[in-house]
Structures are given as C-alpha cells and as structure tokens.
Amino acid sequence: MQIATANPITKERFLDIRSRTEEICKSLKPEDVSIQPVDFVSPPKWHLAHTTWFFETFVLLKYKSNYQVFHKDFGYYFNSYYNNVGERVIRANRGMMTRPTLDEIIAYRAYVNEHIAQFLEDKVEKDICDVIEIGLQHEQQHQELLIYDIKYIFGHQPSFPKLDFEIKLESENSTQEFIKIDEGIYDIGHNENCFCWDNELGQHKVYLHGFEISNRLVTNKEYVEFIEAGGYQDFNLWHADGWDWIQSNQINAPLYWYKVDGKWMHYTLQGFKAIEANLPVNHLSFYEAFAFSQWIDMRLPTEFEWEVASPHLEYGQLWEWTNSAYLPYPNYSKAEGAIGEYNGKFMVNTMVMRGASVASPKGHCRPTYRNFFTPETRWQFSGIRLAR
C-alpha cells in the first residue's frame, strides 16, 4: 500500500473513525445485530468486532509491550479470511454466534480503543503508523459494508424498518450528454500523495480508442422502461451466466423493488417508498447492468476508460460497474504475510467497479479506487454509466 501523509495518525482521528462505526449502529436493536440472512451478509455485531480484532491483532499484539488480549477466543471468532493469522469461524456461520453478546463486543471496542489511544500518545514509528492507517481504511470499508448488510437485513423483513443514519441519493437531473474522449495513450494508476490500496499501484500506460461516456447515471425511469419492454425476458441481451442466474433466481427487477397495485415501490433505509423517476437506479448486478446497456444499444465503459474520463464526471452516488475483470496491474506486488491477503487473492471471477457511493466514508472516493464484486452481487450500492 501507499500510505497517506496528508492524514497523520492521531488519537483524535483514530477515535473519530472508530466512533462512526458505532454511529451507524445507534438505532439497531439487540435483535438486529446477530442475524445473517444469507452468507454474503455479515451480522452488524460481527463488523463491530472484526474491525476491532484488526487493531488488536496487527497493532497491539505486535507492537504494544505487555498487552493482554481482551478474550483468548476472539481471534478465532472474528478473523475474516486471513489464513496467515490462523483458523476462523467460516463466513456462513457468523450469524450462528449469539455469543459473545453485543455488550461484550462494545466492551471489546472500548478496551482496544483505550489501548490504541494510549499507544498513540507516544511517538510511533512510521511502519507502525502505516499499519494503523491500513486498519482505519479497512474500518471505513466495513462502515460501508455495514450499511449494505443492515439494509439487506431490514429490507427482507415485512416491517421494512428505518435506519437512523442518513443515506440519501440525489436526482440525476442533468440532460444526458456524452463526453468525448479522444483516442490516445493514457496513464492509469495511482500517483498522488495520499493513501491507496496496493491494487491501484503499478502506474502504466494504456491505449484507448476514442469513445464517449455519459455525463450521468441511468435513472429509475429509464430502467423501468427496460423492464416493461421485456428486458428480463429477452435472452439475447444477457450473458449466458447472467441468463442462467435470472432464470434460476426468478429475477425480474433490481434488488428491493416490488410492484404493488401496478406501481413500482422499493425499500430504502428511510422506509418503503414509491420509485422516484429521476433517482439513479440502484442495486443492480453486473449482469443486469450489461443487459441494460445492450438493450439501449450502448455498453459499459472499461475501468481504464472510466478513469481517463473521471475528471469530466460527477461521480460518487453509486459504485459504477465497468466491463473490466479485476486483474493485477503491471508490476503489481503483493505484500508479505496477512496484509498481502487483502486484495491479491481476489483477482479472479470478479468485475471492477469505479467511483464511490453515498454510503462511502469521506476520503474513499478517488479516481483510481478499484472496488470489485462477483457479477451476480447487487446488495452493494451499484449503478450504471453508459459508454459508446
């Protein structure tokens, strides 16, 4: 990773980022925090503990003398996928852990926060600050995942609960125009004095044919037209895998959409509401984004086209699917040990998304950020920008 110099590691910054995780959860009830309706959704309680485990495992146990772990079994309970660290509860079984209780996990967070805050009162070497920075960036990623997971938990309950943490999309009111990007050779990859993940490094040149890219995202109104034109029934628009996926899972609309008395409704974190025509369509899989682009006789941009065009775009409402597989850049180098498991091991069977979303923490929106998901996933805040 390339570590920020603009955001120094201070006790105040550490505690501020940590407190935001708890702020997201402030209106959750004890019954909300342990449930895991599907294997890709983690219980909110687990996020609270896992982000704490990161600091205990990679900072306090390695660098703070005489540190005593909060609980000897928490390393097993709350490791996610770091094989270098040891055994763990498998992902699909996280929702089976009613213990430790939420109160114990809040106490765990307070205990680790206190020890890190004490640790930061003294001069800390740069290599240790770098690990803490990774932990803070990691926690902020989990803040966004936490919002996705809470929405999935709430959005599959008949009462459609609200979350007392504002997440709001804005209308895409601009008249659609297409920004022209000339043919040429362009630099791709991170080259700024701020934090980035290792998958953004390895600046290199790419050749692009001339193309045009939309100045805005696809709206709900436009996507309803796709649905009503039979987009989910026309196999010609879909990848073979995508067609199998919608047939097997009886998919006929974006996630959280329902047709009630002939009117499209959807679940938001502010409750069950009518679809607003000019909001960007949200919660689409790569398969659906691709099919829509085919239906409208356009395509999805590659991640390189998106990055080159990014200075001309207003982005950050929704993560935007690209037509690029998630692969390493030239000269990509994976870090040694557990930290090296963070990105490189997932460079297969996933597609790149660019931009950010309204659920992304401040500072997690930069033109080189490479998010990635498998093509069927759509619980993340995901939308479509067209190219041609």
Image (cartoon, grey):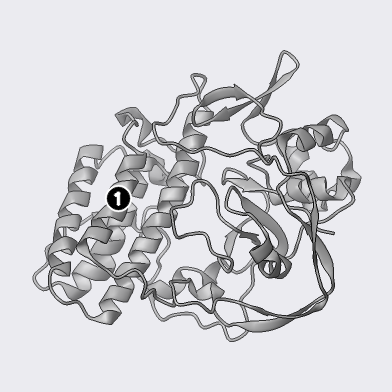
Which of the image's four quarters has the C terminus? Answer: bottom right
50 w.r.t. 121: above or below: above
Q: Which of 346 and 309 is in front in this view?
A: 309
> Number of labelled discs?
1
* In this rendering, position of residue 16 left or right of residue 251: left
141 w.r.t. 126: above or below: above
Residue 104 in picture, x, y percent from top left:
20, 43
Residue 335 in picture, x, y percent from top left:
44, 80
Most extreme residue toward the left, as rendered? 66
To which residue does mark 1 refer?
A: 49
Residue 367 in picture, x, y percent from top left:
59, 66
240 w.r.t. 60: above or below: above
Residue 103 in picture, x, y percent from top left:
20, 38
Residue at (65, 64) in percent of width and height? 310
Crowding at dot 1, Cα within 10 Å, few <14 / some 14-19 / many 20+, comes out as many
Residue 311 location, quadrant: bottom right
Q: In the image, what residue type sits under mark 1?
A: Ala
Q: Is residue 293 in view from this perspective?
A: yes
Residue 170 location, quadrant: top right
